[in-house]
Image (tube, grey):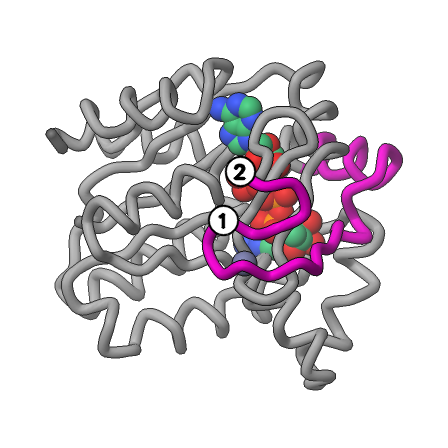
């Protein structure tokens, strides 16, 4: 299965990508996570991306296209992949198509997770993750079973993203509308677009995604 998850920041792309990854055993690829890792390791790419990410602006196309090109060439993508956060511009979508065409790969679906802005803010401002394994949590909607202990790895250190603040989120929403939204009609025309109401619980949304994908 070759999938793209579209949706505003905080819509639940990463959360659903992880669930699909568990159900189907295909890698979830997040350009945001790869950029944050690059920044943590102090690579040139990470340093270049930092100012854009902190301001809630998109990182230049050539950087993220390079990331995806390298990542899709890895062995574990052979049987499928879930792209979370890429493409984010029409140009990225077109270049991805060329890349996949050359490999003889067809996308199976593009799932748009729809969530209104009022809910987005609450989701993003409550978001945090495990420092050790990256598992995502939320102050209200996705708490660890034991307070302060990661369900997945037992880690006790957590972090919040520096760009998960009100001003940056507002910029990210504006950019989503202006730059990412045009990819939706693009995939609709190709007959690939599937829309999911992302306002229910994580499990409810996941059930809807599973039924679109014909899982279960
Ligand atoms: P994205 O990858 O689209 O930016 P995330 O998957 O990181 O979004 O989700 C943002 C925050 O909202 C996280 O803290 C996550 O735990 C929480 N979340 C995700 N899906 C839901 C949902 N259906 N209901 C409530 N909270 C959710
Ligand atoms: P969210 O899902 O909350 O929007 P991500 O983790 O996907 O956040 O992305 C964080 C930041 O990384 C974005 O605000 C942007 O600066 C950069 N980024 C990630 N993916 C892309 C992309 N495909 N194109 C340009 N910038 C990107
Ligand atoms: Zn953990």
Q: Are marks 2 and 1 in contact (CB under 8 Å)?
A: yes
Magenta stretch in the rendered image? 146-175
Q: Which residue is mark 2?
A: 145
Tell me the distance, in whole angstroms, between the alpha carbons under discs 2 and 1: 6 Å
The structure residue drawn at horizontal position 44% and vertical position 26%, both measured from the top left corner, is 202
Tell me the quarter of the image containing the C terminus: top left
User: Residue 203: horizontal and vertical position, in percent?
Assistant: 37, 24
**Badge number at residue 94:** none
Compare marks 2 and 1 and give the one earlier in the sequence: 2
Looking at this view, is 162 or 60 the one in front?
Answer: 162
Residue 113 placement: quadrant: top left
User: Residue 164: horizontal and vertical position, in percent?
Assistant: 77, 43
Whether the magenta-drawn stretch holds residue 151 is answered as yes
| Above or below, comparing residue 160 to residue 208 in the picture | below
User: Residue 15: horizontal and vertical position, in percent?
Assistant: 47, 40
**Badge number at residue 151:** 1
Q: Across the whole image, how many numbered discs are drawn on residues?
A: 2
| Above or below, comparing residue 54 to residue 5 in the picture | below
Other-residue count near label 1 (Cα within 10 Å), few / some / many at <14 / 14–19 / ≥20: some
Residue 126 placement: quadrant: top right
Helix or strand or loop: what does disc 2 sit on?
Answer: loop
Q: Would residue 9 be visible to someone looking at this image?
A: no
Q: Would residue 157 be visible to someone looking at this image?
A: yes
The answer to whether mark 1 is within 8 Å of ligand 3 is yes
Looking at this view, is 147 or 129 the one in front?
Answer: 147
Looking at this view, is 160 or 51 the one in front?
Answer: 160
Question: Would residue 80 be found to the left or right of residue 156 on screen?
Answer: left
| Above or below, comparing residue 47 to residue 44 in the picture | above
The answer to whether mark 2 is within 8 Å of ligand 3 is no
């Amino acid at each position: 299965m070759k999938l793209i998850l579209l949706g505003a920041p905080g819509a639940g792309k990463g959360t659903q990508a992880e669930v699909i990854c568990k159900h189907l055993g295909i890698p979830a690829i997040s350009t945001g996570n790869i950029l944050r890792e690059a920044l943590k390791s102090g690579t040139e790419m990470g340093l270049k991306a930092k100012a854009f990410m902190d301001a809630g602006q998109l990182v230049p196309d050539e950087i993220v296209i390079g990331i995806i090109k390298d990542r899709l060439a890895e062995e574990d993508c052979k049987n499928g992949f879930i792209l979370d956060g890429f493409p984010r511009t029409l140009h990225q979508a077109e270049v991805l198509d060329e890349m996949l065409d050359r490999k003889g790969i067809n996308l199976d679906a593009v799932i748009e997770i729809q969530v209104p802005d009022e809910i987005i803010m609450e989701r993003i401002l409550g978001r945090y993750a495990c420092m050790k394994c990256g598992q995502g949590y939320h102050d209200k909607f996705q708490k660890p079973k034991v307070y302060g202990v990661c369900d997945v790895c037992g880690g006790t250190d957590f972090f919040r993203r520096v760009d998960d603040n009100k001003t940056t989120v507002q910029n990210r929403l504006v950019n989503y509308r202006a730059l990412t939204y045009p990819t939706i009609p693009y995939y609709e025309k190709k007959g690939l677009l599937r829309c999911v109401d992302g306002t229910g619980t994580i499990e409810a949304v996941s059930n809807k995604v599973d039924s679109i994908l014909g899982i279960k």
